[in-house]
Image (cartoon, rainbow, N blue to C red):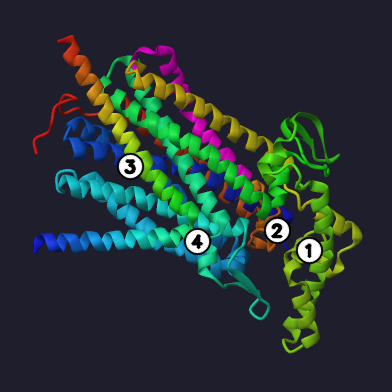
Amino acid sequence: MKTLMHFLIYLTIAGLVILLAIILGDYGTWYFAWLLGTVMLVLISAAGAALLDAQEEDEGRRRD
Amino acid sequence: MIDPMVVELSRWQFAATALYHFLFVPLTLGLSFLLAAMETVYVTTGRTIYRDMAQFWGKLFLINFALGVATGLTMEFQFGTNWSFYSSFVGDIFGAPLAIEGLMAFFMESTFVGLMVFGWARLSKAQHLAVTYLVALASNLSAVWILVANGFMQDPQGALFNPDTMRMELASFGELIFSHDAQSKFVHTSIAGFVTAAVFVCGVSAYYMLRGRHLAIAKRSFRMAALFGVLSSAGVITLGDALGFVGAHAHPSKLVAMEGLWEYEEPPVGFNVIAIPNEEEMQNDYALRIPYLTSLLVTRSLHDPVPSADTLIERADERIRSGIEAVTALKALQDDPDDTEARARFEAHQDDLGYGFLVGFYAQDQDPALATEADIQRAARDAIPNMAIVFWSFRVMVVSGLLMLAFFTLAVIFTLRNDVHRQRAFLRFSLLMIPVPFIACEAGWLVAEVGRQPWTVYEVLPTWMSVSTHSVNHLIFSLAGFVLLYSIFIAIEMYLMVKFIRQGPTEHGHATAVAAK
């Protein structure tokens, strides 16, 4: 039951996202580009931090 | 009768408050998403250092946010106090996005800012992260609605003038919020805020690295901001170019001023890299040009015509004459709404009504019907904004944008090699870069707003008609009061920022320590 509920919630979210993408894609292409671009900026920035952690751990291991 | 000095002082007052306010806004827009990125790493990796980072930068965000709110509130009141005819004339359209901004975005932002600051111990990690994202989203949603309102002033879409009520009425909410000007302006402004925040975080992190303090936090903050900044600055430049392309079609008089184009030239038209615009002679006293570039930037072709001041003045002259007909017909309709001849005459000329209003400023008794040939020519000439201000502000913005792209490119190279903390010259340069995005944002604002003159709503309502009928003394007093008060706000912001930056972040563990679940 819990899995079904999760499935329905995620399905609803996916449906809303697709609807938003269709509306914004048709009428608000700039807004849509901003949404995608901002998500990308946040993820790349976060990935950069994770990469720095990995680089420092690697350097630490080499020093040891 | 409206005193020209009242118009000037009202403009100065709004410009001064907006310039002050716009010192705080870009940092809020960008820092909120950088906080969200830092917290995302904390929640996904469990490393406490990212929570310390989010808490430290969150403190600086809060100082900036509070002062941004304090300086922004008075601007909305100014529409009513200093721009009452404007508020009455376009209130149906302009009021809607402003109200939505207050009720939806600002309330959401303010509520979640409280949860973000005080909720660290009370909310779960995921809940707090959701709150931080909502703060970032709400800050930027706030900008959406403000720029929808501003977009209407630059390129009035979705509204019609009703001669019976003497007001503009909203015809299509969709056209208003999806107008290309509003959309492109929002994206450009928001991403400019991202760049501002990235430069700020890099600069402050550089300060710590130069002093050998909080190295782990400084290196991570620098890395995240550098990546955030390099992509944002590339985005802001390309979006700025796209905004210029949209603006060239919607608002040619601004484009002409940005590019310093006085006389019509057969395409392809060269780009004035540097020029000294001479307003009296209507020419550039000196110009250094790159061939073909303006045509490519503005029309994306080497054959399409590019607007120039002389052709726009000629067009304005024709539209003023047509606009005078519209104003006279409108007066007849006010006297007798059933006058079918006057209604037909008004409908034939209503597209030029704004130009009819424009010439009133120069005409005897401010009555367009009494405008002389000289008045018409003067009004047509003044349909072009102050070229020197727009031209140079545009160049300051562009050069700053390119400088920031170069800065972030180097920053990314150094940080990816993980030796930025050893590049002392570059770290000093990073500190010096902190004011650059703020200057660029202010210059961009000047391009947008001075470039819209002599209109508050482009080709619909001239600035001179929009003001309230205050006395000059009243405006001098309130302008001086605002400048004094806002200067104190800036001093408070600087004091608090410097104080908390010197204090530095509170660290709760080693960079690689994984927090207990």
Q: Magenta segment range? A: B421-449
* Sooner in the amino-acid sequence: mark 3 or mark 2: 3
Task: State the image coordinates of residue B234 (x, y, percent, origin top left).
Answer: 49, 35
- Please name the amino acid that badge 4 sits on: Tyr
The subunit letter for the residue under badge 2 reads B
Read off the residue under disc 3: B62
Q: Main secondary structure of the magenta part?
A: helix
Q: Secondary structure at mark 3?
A: helix
Do callouts 4 and 2 point to residues on the same chain? no
Q: Does the magenta portion include B419?
A: no
Read off the residue under disc 4: A27
Do callouts 4 and 1 point to residues on the same chain? no
Q: Is residue B442 above or below residue A34?
A: above
- Give the mark toward the camera: 3 or 4: 4
Q: Is residue A10 visible?
A: yes
Q: What is the quadrant of residue B367 in the picture?
A: bottom right
* Sooner in the amino-acid sequence: mark 2 or mark 1: 1
Q: Residues within 10 Å of mark 1 (few under 14, many from 20)?
A: many
Report the quarter where the N terminus of chain B lies: bottom right
Q: Badges 2 and 1: C-beta atoms under 8 Å apart?
A: yes
Q: Secondary structure at mark 1?
A: helix
Report the quarter where the C terminus of chain B lies: top left
Marks 3 and 2 sit apart, C-alpha to C-alpha, by 38 Å
Do callouts 3 and 4 point to residues on the same chain? no
Q: Is residue B188 left or right of residue B160?
A: left
Q: Residues within 10 Å of mark 2 (few under 14, many from 20)?
A: many
- Give the mark toward the camera: 4 or 1: 4
Residue at screen point 39% across, 19% down: B414
Q: Badges 4 and 2: C-beta atoms under 8 Å apart?
A: no
Residue at screen point 38% across, 39% down: A41
Q: Is residue B481 visible?
A: no
Q: Secondary structure at mark 2?
A: helix
